[in-house]
Image (cartoon, grey):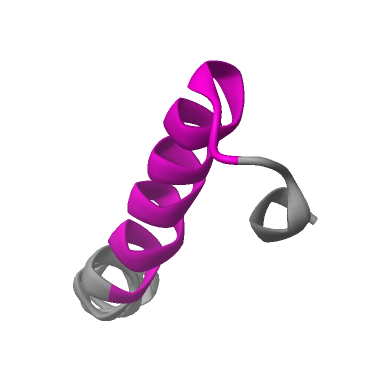
Amino acid sequence: WIGARPVEYPYTSTGLILTLMYFTYFITDPVLMKIWEKLIK
């Protein structure tokens, strides 16, 4: 959705924030899963 918008102020910053959130998930998910497994045991 955001990639189809024109390259203007609100859309570029929104795209940057959403991209950071997307890749942060893949970085933090394995770490959080290991912590979760330790908490369950």
Q: Nearer the viewer, residue 22 or 37?
A: 22
21 sits to left or right of 10: left
Quadrant occupied by the C terminus? bottom left
Above or below residue 40? Residue 17 is above
Residue that appears at 50% across and 18% down: 9
Image position, residue 7 (x, y; %): 55, 39
The residue drawn where x is 42% and y is 55% is: 19
Q: Quadrant of residue 40?
A: bottom left
Going by the image, does 25 lie left or right of 15?
Answer: left
Quadrant showing the N terminus: bottom right
Say whether residue 33 is left or right of residue 7.
left
Q: In the image, is residue 8 part of the stretch drawn in magenta?
A: yes
Q: Position of residue 33 (x, y in %)?
A: 34, 76
Instruction: Examine the residues drawn in magenta and state their main secondary structure.
Output: helix
Q: Is residue 29 shown above or below 12?
A: below
Nearer to us in this view, 3 or 7: 7
Please provide percent x and percent y for residue 30: 27, 81
- Taking the magenta stretch, the answer to whether it contains residue 22 is yes
Residue at the far top in the pictured view? 9
Residue 11 versus residue 40 in the image, above or below: above
> Residue sitting at 67 percent across and 41 percent down?
6
| Residue drawn 59% across the image and 31% down it | 11
Q: Which residues are magenta?
A: 7-26
Q: Position of residue 18 (x, y in %)?
A: 50, 46
